[in-house]
Amino acid sequence: MRKYWGLVLSLAFVISCKEDKPVTDEIAEVVTIEKPVVVKEFGFNLDDFEVLRDTVKNGDSFGELMLKNRVDYPKIARVSEHFRDTFDVRKIVVGKPYLILKSKDTINNAQVFIYQNDPINYTVVDFRDSVLAYKKKQKVKYVEREASGIIESSLSEAILQQGIDYNVTNNLSEIYAWTIDFFRLQKGDRFKVIYKEKYINDTIYAGASGIEAAYFEHNGEPFYAFNFVSDSTKNINDYYDDQAKNLRRTFLQSPVQFSRISSRYNLNRRIAYYGYKVRPHKGTDYAAPIGTPILATANGTVTESTRRGGNGKYVKIQHNGTYSTQYLHMKNQKVKKGDFVKQGDVIGWIGMTGNTGGPHVCYRFWKNGQQVDPLREKLPAAEPIADSLKTDYLEFVGPKKSQLDCIEYIELPEEDLLTLN
Ligand SMILES: [Zn+2]
C-alpha cells in the first residue's frame, strides 16, 4: 500500500520547474511590501490628534498617566470599575508600548489611550464620549516565503545566515524530531522550506509562522514534510511525508519481528544463579532463534557498535536529544559507528554473545542518559492519516511537492561565510 502511494506521487507530479513559473512570479509580487504613509493606525486617523507614543515605565500607573494628560478623575475611575475584564489597569506591563491621542485644541487632553498587549492585540480606551474600552486585533497579512540551505556546521547557522527567523529553525527541528537527529547533521545535508511570514498592517514584520512544507536531505536520504489538517472538526493538523505517513513516528514496539518477550524490565529482579540477590534488569529481552534480524526501532545514528563484557556484541543508536536505544548479545552487527539508520533497518542478528543463557536480544531504552522501561514510557502517538482522507491529502500535497522540488539551493559565497564566522 505504501509503495503504491509513493508511486502515484512520483508519477503524478513530475512537473518541470520552468513551466511552473507563475509560482515564483506570485512570490516576487508579494515580496515587495510598500511603505505607505500611515495615516490610519489602530482604526484612528492619527492626523486628527496630537500623538504621544511611549512605553510603560517602571512606576507608571494608568491613572497617573491619564491625570497627567488631563483626563477627569471620574472617567479614569470608570475604566477600572466597568471595564476590568477588557482592560485591567493594574496589569499594565513595563516596556509595553502605548499611544495617547490628544485633542489638537487648547485643552490638549487625552481622548484615546491605546495599549499594545502584543504586536497583534491592542486595547483601546476611548474617553471622548462616555468612557469605552475594547480590545482589537491588528490586521495580519501572511506572506508565503521559500528558503533553502546547505548545512556547513549547523542548521541554525545555515538559516540565520540568510536572515531567516529563528522560528523556522525551531519549527523544522520539531517537525523532524522523530525522523532526523538534529544533533548529528552531516556537512552537506540540505533543506528546503515553504513557510509564512506575518505582517501587521502590511508593513510591520511580526515573525515567521508555521511551516507549510519542508524537504530535508540527511545522509542523502530525502524526507518530505507537509502540514495537513487531518481532522477539521477538532482542528488537528500534523506533518506527514510524501507517502502520507506521520512524521512523528514513535518507536517500533519491538526490535525483532515474531519474537516473544522472555524477560521484562525489572529493577527488583532476583536470579537463582546469583543466590537470589537483586540483579536489576534494565532491558527487555526478546527471544528468537539465532540469526533472526534485529531492527532499529527508530531513525537515528549509530553511536556504538562494539563488543564489551556481558553485553557481548551490541549496537547503540541515538535517535534525538532525548532517546537512545541499545541492542545486546548480537551474533554480529550489520552497522558501524556513525552510520545513519532508519526505523526498521536491520542492524544485526540475534546471537548469544556476552552473558546470556539463550539466544535473545536485550533491548535497552535510554531517556536522557537513564535506562527506562520502553513499555511504560509515554511516547508521542503518531496518528496515521485516515484512509478516507488519503486522496485529499495526495491532491493537496502534489503542488506543494512540486513547489519544493523547484526551490534551488542557496549557496552563500565563500566571503560571506568568512565574514560571518
Ligand atoms: Zn536483558
Image: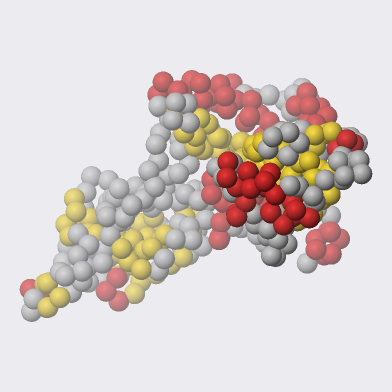
Q: Residue at x 49, y 37 (%)?
A: 238
For residue 318, what is the image quadrant?
A: bottom left
Looking at the image, in which quadrant does ligand 1 appear? bottom left
Identify whether 138 is placed above or below 305. Answer: above
Q: Nearer the viewer, residue 116 or 73?
A: 73
Coloration of the structure image: secondary structure
Residue 159 makes an appearance in the image? no
Identify whether 245 is placed above or below 416. Answer: above
Residue 285 rendering spot, x and y as whole percentages: 22, 59
Residue 299 rendering spot, x and y as whole percentages: 45, 51
Q: Residue at x 38, y 43 (%)?
A: 381
Q: Nearer the viewer, residue 9 or 52?
A: 52
Q: Nearer the viewer, residue 12 or 129?
A: 129
Q: Nearer the viewer, residue 149 or 335?
A: 149
Residue 154 rendering spot, x and y as whole percentages: 65, 59
Q: Residue at x 36, y 68 (%)?
A: 370
Identify whether 276 is placed above or below 240. Answer: below
Q: Which quarter of the image is occupied by the C terminus?
A: bottom right
